Image (cartoon, rainbow, N blue to C red):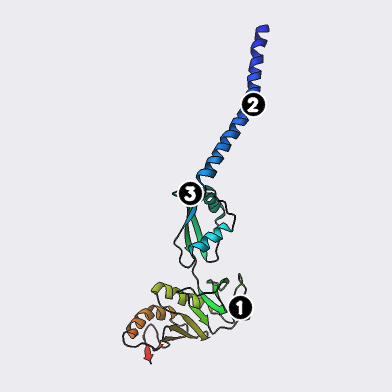
Amino acid sequence: MENTELTLVPERKKRKVWKIILPVLLLLILAAGSAYVVICYSIEGMLITDTITYSDSEVIHAIQSEYYIPNTLAMIIENRILGQTYLPFVENITMSCEDPHILKVKVKEKFRAGVFKYMGKYVYFNEEGIAMESRNHLFEGVPVVTGLEYDKMVLGEKIPVKGNYFRTIVVITKKIVAYGLDISEIHFEGENNITLISGDYEIFLGSTDYLEDKMSKLASVLETVSREKNKGKIDMHLYTDEKEIITFHE
């Protein structure tokens, strides 16, 4: 019995020692790992790619203004969990890193349906007609919409336009983008009285009948007319699938 007691006492002491040492070792390992991640993955710069209208500095400022952690791994994990878009017309942002100190940010922008000029500002809206962003300048390729009536504009809310115009605007703007048309203005005198402005050319579309076909044809029409005339009015209001009636007046 005495021999048994002599061997058990040291074992108990060893266990007590390990109960103290083991947590300390784990803490040291965690601390060393954390220090490694903090030091070796600290953000020293950002590489912004695929932006169309937003500048690199705008994207960087937006990222640094919302739950920013100056660590590439932390930002990648945060972005994958939360999926922040940061800016009104950004559909999604993907973060990655090849260099542990450089955060690579790939931006996919949303479609801007159009813009109204309101109180000295350019107010951009989405496909649902919601005012998303107010700017001091006009982005290239986004047509200004004129001739519509509304009482006010509030960012984040649908623009209270009197009439059903936004579907028509979206169709026109998408065709402008698809065909690379130089259209600066979409003017309405009513839902079935539409005129486009392209430089010194006025394009009278008339009603929304055959609207997509008219827009698809417009690129070749403008190209043909511009060879001989520097300005004038292109009339497409009689255009149909069966009769592609298009006239030109100086």
Which picture quadrant has residue 243? Answer: bottom left
Q: Secondary structure at mark 1?
A: loop
Among the two numbered marks 2 and 3 on one chain, the one whose residue lies closer to the N terminus: 2
Position of residue 122 relative to residue 56, above or below, is below
Amino acid carrying mark 2 in the image: Lys
Q: Which mark is residue 11?
A: none
Residue 139 percent across, percent down from the top left: 48, 73
Q: Which residue is mark 2?
A: 19
**Structural crowding at the residue carrying mark 1, measured as other residues with C-alpha within 10 Å and reported as few (<14), some (14–19) or many (≥20):** some
**Structural crowding at the residue carrying mark 2, measured as other residues with C-alpha within 10 Å and reported as few (<14), some (14–19) or many (≥20):** few
Q: Secondary structure at mark 3?
A: loop
Q: Is residue 90 left or right of residue 3?
A: left
Residue in view at x 63 percent, y 20 percent: 14
Q: Secondary structure at mark 2?
A: helix
Among the two numbered marks 2 and 1 on one chain, the one whose residue lies closer to the N terminus: 2
Residue 140 percent across, percent down from the top left: 45, 74
Residue 1 visible in rendering? no
Q: Which residue is mark 1?
A: 160
